[in-house]
Amino acid sequence: MQANIIQRVVEELRTTLPGRYFGKIFQLTPVSFAIDFGLRGEFLFISVDPSSPRLYLIHRRTRDLEKQSIPLGAFGQTMRSKLSGAHVVNISKDPSDRIVRLTFRFEDLIFRRLIIQLTGRTADLFIVDELNRIEAVLREDPRLRRHNIYEPPKTRTGQDGRPALALGPGSPSAQLDAHFSALDTARRFDSAARAIRAKLTKSIRQQRTLREHLEQDLARHGDAEEHKRIGDLLLANIATARRDGNKVSITDYYSESAPTIEIEGDENRSLQEEAAVRFRNYGKAKRAAEEIAARLDHITTETAALEQRLQQLDQIIASRDQSALDSFEKPAPAPKTPAKKSRKPEKLTGVRRYLSTDGYEILVGRAARDNDNLTFRIAQPNDLWMHTGDYPGSHVVVRNPTRKEIPQRTIIEAAQLAGRFSQASEDAKVVVHYTERKFLSKPKGAAPGLVRLSRFRSITVEPKEAIPRL
């Protein structure tokens, strides 16, 4: 605030504050206060924030100040104890500086002053006694200034470098309140907008980084069809291949001219073993391609949605729409759905029930007709279904109500149950096929327990009952 404007505020305060008693204090920030002098809706606002020190009257509702205020700090508590019960007898401004002094008198003729230093970087609040000794200080270290004689700052700060503020006729406090309220509102808008924009741009960067990592992961798995092609050629060239250390020369039967090509392999592995490695790599690369493709599609959708929100935010910032900014990050209210009637506990017959280590319910059929009932009546489309590869046995279902990926540990535990309740229960190892229930069908006229699988994967486990039965 400029010295001439401070002088105008002081002149206004001289017409309203003398004789008024120091009342309730509202601390609005660590360096700003609103003080009630019984002016019915008007409060003296004091801020010694070095970036914008201020002093003027404000119109506010008491309940709004109560909501905005923070607990009184040490200086606020001292100000309340030192000035409560005193009334204002004088208000003055130092002629050569932006310092305002409010003099208070108590009934026993004791005087104290509240010194408001509106001097930029040295802005501060002091309480001094009749002899000008400092009793409390807000910003400076109280241990350095307490009981010392108050002196204005030696370095004059002059104006604060901002454009001069011109006030018109009328109440300077009303004009200052309107001016600084608009500045504070704009500052809060800009701060909130920057924070939201930074959060959005960070999310977009994370999505792009994740895409790069997935693409690198996909490249590391290699071309699935090339792995299969080399595996097939290795098996086709078992009798004619020539080896030289880790180099293998084979005929490429997939090319029209059937040229001889050279591939690298582990010299300690046979061609059959090398082919098996290539087929395993084929399976891994194919699964990776499917899974990564799905994740890349999801990332593309997420990134597009984030970029669209960023555009919407930029439009809100350009129009400075405070209400739109306030509601920008608030989630849309969830649609109200009628409360569902509580279902009776499901009664399961003809099945054994288990609980996996990861908390998934596993159901095991007892007889052939029980297997049909479990698979085609109880199981849901996204539940995981299992059965031993080449042996009769129970159908096993891992329930998946959340439709999330089932942990590998649960898959192994369910497969072990499938092996345990089959004719391979005494074998050391057993192959178990598994797939989602939606990939099963019942051939017309087939015997109970027989199903057709349109797709499946396999796992080799030890037949056993390794988890608790319910």
Image (cartoon, helix red, strand yellow):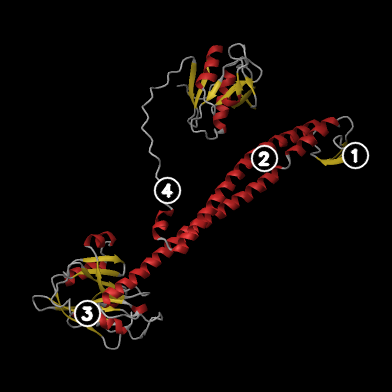
Relative depth, front residue between 426 and 183: 183
Query: Mark 4: which amino acid?
Result: Pro
Of marks 2 and 4, which one's residue comes earlier in the chain? 2
Depicted 187 relative to depicted 386: above or below: below
Query: Mark 3: which amino acid?
Result: Glu
Query: Residue at image x 84%, y 30%?
Result: 236
Q: The C terminus lies in which quarter of the figure?
A: top left
Query: Mark 1: which amino acid?
Result: Pro
Please rate how many residues cluster around mark 3, counting C-alpha atoms within 10 Å: few if below 14, some from 14 to 19, many from 20. Answer: some
Relative depth, front residue between 169 and 362: 169
Look at discs 1 and 4 and give the one toward the viewer: 4
Task: Give residue 57's position: percent from left, percent from top.
Answer: 24, 73
Q: According to the image, label 3 marks what residue?
A: 12
Separation (CA) of disc 3 from disc 1: 102 Å
Depicted 235 relative to depicted 112: above or below: above
Q: The N terminus lies in which quarter of the figure?
A: bottom left
Relative depth, front residue between 67 and 179: 179
Of marks 3 and 2, which one's residue comes earlier in the chain? 3
Q: According to the image, label 1 marks what residue?
A: 259
- Horizontal side of 365 relative to 98 (left or right) equals right
Viewer can see residue 9: yes
Q: According to the image, label 4 marks what residue?
A: 331
Depicted 454 relative to depicted 247: above or below: above
Task: Give residue 114's position: percent from left, percent from top.
Answer: 22, 77
SS at badge 3: helix
Separation (CA) of disc 1 from disc 2: 30 Å
Look at discs 3 and 1 and give the one toward the viewer: 3
Please rate how many residues cluster around mark 2, counting C-alpha atoms within 10 Å: few if below 14, some from 14 to 19, many from 20. Answer: many
Separation (CA) of disc 3 from disc 2: 77 Å
Query: Residue at image x 83%, y 34%?
Result: 233
Query: Mark 2: which amino acid?
Result: Ala
